[in-house]
Amino acid sequence: MKQQQQHDRVTPQQEQKGVANDPPLQGEGNYTAARRHRKSAEQFVDSGRVEQAAHEAAPKDSAEQRDMHQAEQAGRARARR
């Protein structure tokens, strides 16, 4: 399984190569990067590793849970309304 996970990931060199092929000006937003991100997200979902990743990201104790909640509240406070 570990070998499969490494195979699915894009290396920084591969990512940089993709960026080098982007058109220099794309107007509002980077459509090429959005397309790469969407493809990567779809591959991750299709891999069946979402549940495992969610479990690994869960807080390990009450202090970590409190920190995560505070960070979320701070982020929401700065979000546009």
Image (cartoon, rainbow, N blue to C red):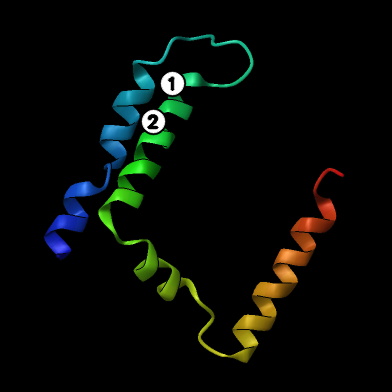
50 or 31: which is nearer to us?
50
Q: Farthest bottom residue?
A: 62
In which quadrant will I find the N terminus?
A: bottom left
Query: What's the residue type where badge 1 is placed?
Result: Thr
Q: Residue at x 71, y 65 (%)?
A: 72
Count residues near mark 2 (Cα–Cα under 10 Å), then give few for <14, some for 14-19, many for 20+. some
Q: Which residue is mark 1?
A: 32
Q: Looking at the picture, how far across and down is residue 32, in whole percent? A: 43, 21
**Tags 2 and 1 in contact by the CB under 8 Å rule?**
yes
Relative to residue 43, is residue 69 depicted above or below? below
Give the spatial CA distance, label 2 vs label 1: 6 Å
Q: Looking at the picture, how far across and down is residue 64, in whole percent? A: 60, 83
Q: Which residue is mark 2?
A: 36
Q: Looking at the picture, how far across and down is residue 47, in whole percent? A: 26, 53
53 or 17: which is nearer to us?
53
Numbered marks: total: 2
Q: Looking at the picture, how far across and down is residue 24, in whole percent? A: 48, 10
Image side of residue 38 versus residue 3, left or right:
right
Q: Residue at x 78, y 63 (%)?
A: 74
Q: Residue 22: which quarter of the image?
A: top left
Query: What's the residue type where badge 2 is placed?
Result: Arg
Q: Residue at x 67, y 78 (%)?
A: 67
Q: Residue 41: which quarter of the image?
A: top left
Q: Residue at x 38, y 61 (%)?
A: 50
Relative to residue 4, is residue 61 depicted above or below? below
Q: Secondary structure at mark 1?
A: helix
In which quadrant will I find the C terminus?
A: top right
